[in-house]
Each structure stands twice: as C-alpha cells, then as structure tokens.
Image (cartoon, helix red, strand yellow):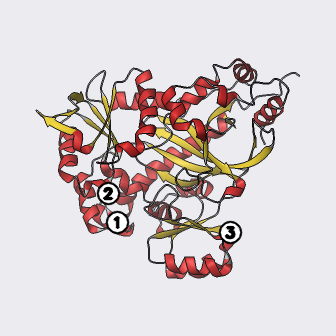
Amino acid sequence: MNLVTDHYLRESSAEGSGLISALRDAPLPASYRTCWGSRMLPRPLFVAQQEIDSVAADICTVFDLLTSLPDRLYDGDVIRYCAALGIDQRRSTLLRSFSRQPITRYGRVDLYHDGGSFRILEMNVASDLGGIDRSVLNSALLALPDFSRFAETHRLSFVHTGEHVNRALQNAAPCSDPAVAMICANGELARYRHLLDSSADMLRSLGTPVFLGELGDVRVRGGRLYLHGSRVDVVLRYFTIDHAVDDEDVIASILDAHDSGNVTLWTTMDSSLYSNKGALSILSDPGLGICTAAERRMLDRILPWTRLLTPELVGRCLTEREHMILKPRRDFGGAGIHAGWEHSDQRWRSLVQSCVGQGYIAQRRVVPVAERISDPDTGTTQEWIATWGVFVTPLGYAGTDIRAAPASAGAVVNYGGNPATRVTGVFTYPADLAAPDP
C-alpha cells in the first residue's frame, strides 16, 4: 500500500471526516450521477506520478508497435494480417477498403498492478471507449473541503481525460469550433444513451457542441454531414466493422466526407485491426523476430505471456491451470473469458479443449495487488481488485479510469461481465512526497 492510500484510509476512519463519504457527497452533474451514481467505488485510487508517466510512455510505444504489425509481418497486406487474426473474408475486405493511414493514436489500455509494476491485460484501440468522462469525478471531489485539504496536503493532481479527448477532437477537426456527433449503430442509441449523455455533457462543458444519433440518422448534403438538421464536423464513432456489414453505404458516405476533408471520422475503421486480442499474441511471441532488442525488453516487461490457443498449447494450459486465462480474440466486455484458477482440473480440461480452434488466446495470469476499500455505511474494509484503464491520444498520456470489483467476485472486472464492478478516478502524487506533519 502506498503512503497516500494509507493516509486516506486512516483519515477516512476519523470521527467527523468527510472523506469516508466523499464520492457520495461530490457535486456531480446530473447525467454523470444518473450513469454512474450507483456504481461508484467509495474512494479514488492513488499512484505515483512517475510510475504512471513511465507506463504511459511504454503504452505509447506498444501502440506504435501494434499498429505497425501489418507492415512488419505482411508488407502492409491487410488481408493476410486479418487472416492471421481470424477475421473473416467479408470483414477483411471491408477493413481493407475502409483502411486509412496513418493510424490515429487513441485508445485505452487495461492493466493490473502486480505490486511491482503495471502489466497489460488488453489494448482497446477504438473510438467507442468507456470512461472518458471519469475526470468529472476528480473535479467534483476537489470541490469538497475535506478532500481539497487532503489533496493539497499530499500534493495530489490528475490528468483530465475529457480535456485531452476534447483537444484531440478539436485538433483533428476540419474547422475551428467544430460540432461533434456521437454516432451509434442503428438500434443501439437507447441502450447506450446513459453512457453517451454523460460523456456528451462533459464535452459540452468544455465548449464543444455535441449531438447524439445513429447511422440511419446521418444525412449527406453537398459532401457534408448532417444529424437531425445540424451540420457535423467530427463523427465520434460508436459503431464498428461488424455494423459496416449491414450499413456499408452509410459508412462509405461518412468516409467519403472524411477523405474530402469536410468531416473527420474519429477514429477510422482501422481500429478493428488492433483491438483484436490476437494482435497481442503476435507482439508477445519473440520467435517471430519482428522487434528490436530494446522493443522486446519493453514488451517482456509490460506484456504477460500471450499466445493463440493451438492444439500444441493444450498440455501447457492444463499443467499450468492456476496461472492461465483464456480470452476470445474478438469479444469484449468480459464475454467468453475462462480463468483456470476458478475451475477444477476436469472442468478446465473441458474448457481448454472446447476453445481450441475457436479463436481464443491463452494468457499468463497477472495477479493484481488488492486495494483496501472502506464501506462508508458500515466502516468495514474489503479487498478489491482494480483494472487501471490508461488513456492515450496523439499528445500522449490522457488520464486513467478505474474499474474495480471485490476480490471475491471473480476474475472478470467489467460492467457487463460482473455486476459487482464499480468505477472511480485516479489521483497522482509526486515521487518526493514525504509524510505530512501530524
């Protein structure tokens, strides 16, 4: 446990302290509270500024390596690269036709901290990222007197993800003062509206007009895009290559407007090439010889052993059951994940055999250090497991989002796969922080 966490827990337990109920008392916008109010962890997490800066620099390097894989392995041949990732011919053809260069650095990398360092679990190279509004919580906490005093004493700071995303959208836009449209696939806006409302309100608070809609709502006039009658300059994409199969014409018209310079698609469809977990298995394999010695040292430091699950790996997976986890290459949200340590030998054998040839990767388990969380109602303390979501944009590190679940609640820490999952923000402290005077 770091010094700041220790101090926070001790001060939270003091009689009359406002820290214990800080997240509940924070003056949050209505849309944020509607979206996250019932799913907030009782306290933020803390990390040394130097440590998060270091891992963010590594993540930017990993991102660049990841997006160079088609060139390094297949001379830029997208079809061959897709075949290696198990992407079918229809989607491969669409990805090649929709491919745009250069790849925009934008994503969220999910990591565990094992007590010694951060380790990558997966790379979310996509525009439809959850948690870009998380820094709203950090700002609200600093408005509380008790938390503000604690932050000042411990010299806490945070990187505002929303401001970085807003700056990235502004920089990429074809004009000044752009209007942004968050566009979902047809039929999905109602499902995700609470999430998008919170992020949209955050961007609006920073001065950017934001509209919400679906692919079917987009209209093209004179090479420009309109949504519900309003001109759109940036499309913040919440649809994927899977939706392009059904809405190819609409997406093609958006890409035409993007190519003509009348609108910016943020980001282009290429991300499906790199969010596929199979790409991590390529990066993890030193036998492919695609990395320099320095790149390999960095990857070995931050990326756990990850391989495509083949018949040749079955024996190792069975022998090392308690240290292995199986993940589908294309699914997200915790779907289809099997953790060896949660199953008997017999059940694990059955799962491994059923996953061979079905597009799964095997990854060596990262054992995360637990965070102690105090319940504001009972005062009891429980151990939680935190997934650190580190955001990057073209300008580099863009803040951190936390998803956490009780250590006893299973291996998946995700809203969809684990209803016990909660969210919070991150504050950093300087490396030279000393214990404050009592």
The residue indicated by pointer 2 is 242
Q: Label 1: few (<14), some or many (≥20) within 10 Å?
A: many
Identify the image quadrant of residue 57: top right
Question: Disc 2 and disc 3: Cα gap in Å?
Answer: 33 Å
Q: Is residue 159 visible?
A: no
Secondary structure at badge 3 equals helix
Task: Using the image as rendered, state which of residue 298 and residue 160 is in the foreground.
Answer: 160
Secondary structure at badge 2 equals helix
Residue flagged by tag 2: what amino acid is it?
Asp
Residue 87 marker: 1
Residue flagged by tag 1: what amino acid is it?
Ile
Question: Disc 3 and disc 1: Cα gap in Å?
Answer: 30 Å
Q: Is residue 137 visible?
A: yes
Residue 116 marker: none
Residue beneath the point at 41% across and 31% down:
200
Q: Where residue 283 appears, x then y in whole percent?
A: 49, 61
Label 3 vs 1, first from the N-terminus: 1
Classify the position of the N terminus by image quarter: top right
Residue beneath the point at 67% across and 56% down:
409
Label 2 vs 1, first from the N-terminus: 1
The residue indicated by pointer 3 is 341
Question: Disc 2 and disc 1: Cα gap in Å?
Answer: 11 Å
